[in-house]
Amino acid sequence: MKQGLDDGNISNLKRKIRGKRRLLGKPKLSADVKLANERELSYLENKVCEKRSENKQRKLKKRYQMVRFFERKKALRRMSRLRKEFQAVASQDQVRLKEAILRCQVDIRYTEEFPIEEKYISIYGGSLISNSRRDEIWSALYDKVKASPHDLI
């Protein structure tokens, strides 16, 4: 039974690529056969790149799943505590609490929207090396959340 081009296995795709390259290396090959095989070769090479990317994303998502979960829970707990404080506090302290609640919302969005194809950079703990990338993503999300029309409280 001949298998289709959409084999999910990278090694099968690589085997097909090797066969196509060998076929294209033959000196006496008609133009239409050569063109069809070149197209199929480029398709297979793109498919291998896609599969590698998917595997990397799946691996990183699985690796950092628990860290994201704990950080999201920490931000949710912090936000619920701040909302309770907000309702019990005088109006002069509410401005400070609104900003803190906004930061918690950004932290929650950070855990949800961090790019999957990169290694996850923790919000609450981390190294000095990765602070610039974390701050870059965090500030972009901060601007997005601050510009959104919904009420913070």
Image: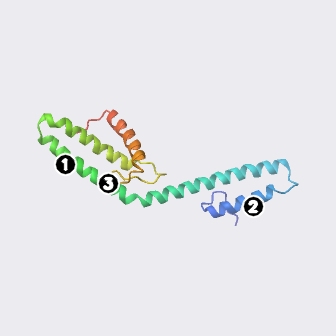
Q: Amino acid at mark 3?
A: Glu
Q: Which residue is mark 1?
A: 81
Q: Which label lies toward us, 1 or 2?
A: 1
Q: Secondary structure at mark 2?
A: helix
Find residue 29 and report its horizontal and vertical position in percent: 86, 53
> Which is nearer the N-term, disc 2 or disc 3?
2
Residue placed furthest toward the bottom: 1
Q: Could you tell me how many numbered marks the image carries?
A: 3
Badge 2 vs badge 3, beta-carbon distance below 8 Å: no
Q: Residue visible at 80% across and 58% down?
A: 23
Q: Image quarter for residue 90?
A: top left
- Where is 31 relative to 18, above or below? above
Q: Quadrant of the N terminus?
A: bottom right
- Horizontal placement of 134 versus 45: left or right? left
Binning the other alpha carbons within 10 Å of mark 1 as few (below 14), some (14 to 19) or many (20 upward) gives few
Find residue 94 and report its horizontal and vertical position in percent: 17, 37
Q: Amino acid at mark 1?
A: Arg
Find residue 50 and report its horizontal and vertical position in percent: 58, 53
Badge 1 vs badge 2, beta-carbon distance below 8 Å: no
Q: Which residue is mark 3?
A: 71
> Which is nearer the N-term, disc 1 or disc 2?
2
Q: Which residue is mark 2?
A: 19
